[in-house]
Amino acid sequence: MAQPTFKLQGAKEIADMFGKLPKQIKQHNVWKALWRKIGKPALNEAKSNVPEKTGRLKNSLGFFTTRATKNFMGLYLGPRVKGAYKSGGKSGYYGAWIEYGNEVMFWGKGVGKAQKYMKPAWDNNKIPMTQKALKEATEIVAKAIKRHEKRMQKYGRLGY
């Protein structure tokens, strides 16, 4: 497995901050909020990079979770290939073919033309994402604590 070429600034501080939250606040939800907040510019740029003929692919781009992402407190950013988007006309099952067209054999007929949309978006946004993570994390923690206090005042311990 290749080592990442960047480092999340303040990762230990963020993990400590999230770890000190009350146990009723689910860790995964707080991490999910952080990744969505700092990843939004990359998502918007990826949507703008998608070739015009692929409207369904543009609609399928977004953040989504799987069972595996809950284990490492993360999200996927890219085209949704199954689930609720499958029948709604928002399927992005062919997103990898467009991204990696020059590296994939298409039904034994050779390779296609790659039209990168995710890699340029990631390359342009990974440094700003890592730099603003700590600031965004403090805002997310403040909101989570405020929500938690409000819920505890209204419902007490039964609110969870």
Image (tube, helix red, strand yellow):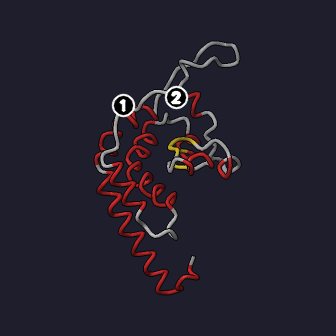
The amino acid type of the residue labelled 1 equals Thr
How crowded pointer 1 is (Cα within 10 Å; few <14, some 14-19, many 20+) is rated as few
The amino acid type of the residue labelled 2 equals Glu
Residue 99: which numbered mark, if any? Answer: 2
Residue at mark 1: 5
Residue 83 lies left or right of residue 133; in this view the side is right
Residue 137 lies left or right of residue 35; in this view the side is left
In the rendered image, residue 88, in percent from the top left (x then y), is placed at 67, 51
Identity of the residue drawn at 65% across and 49% down: 85
Identity of the residue drawn at 45% across and 75% down: 148
In the rendered image, residue 59, in percent from the top left (x then y), is placed at 55, 47
Q: Nearer the viewer, mark 1 or mark 2?
A: 1
Res 42 quadrant in image: top left
| In the rendered image, the vertical position of residue 6 relative to residue 62, given as above or below | above
Circle nearer the N terminus (1, 2): 1
Q: Nearer the viewer, residue 134 or 105?
A: 134
Q: Nearer the viewer, residue 137 or 58?
A: 137
Task: Please identify the quadrant where the C terminus is shown.
Answer: bottom right
Identity of the residue drawn at 29% across and 57% down: 135
Residue 98 lies left or right of residue 142; in this view the side is right
Q: Is disc 2 placed on a helix, strand or loop? A: helix
Identity of the residue drawn at 63% across and 49% down: 67
The answer for how far apart the CA atoms under marks 1 and 2 are is: 21 Å
How crowded pointer 2 is (Cα within 10 Å; few <14, some 14-19, many 20+) is rated as some
In the rendered image, residue 121, in percent from the top left (x then y), is placed at 40, 37
Res 21 quadrant in image: bottom left
In the rendered image, residue 155, in percent from the top left (x then y), is placed at 54, 85
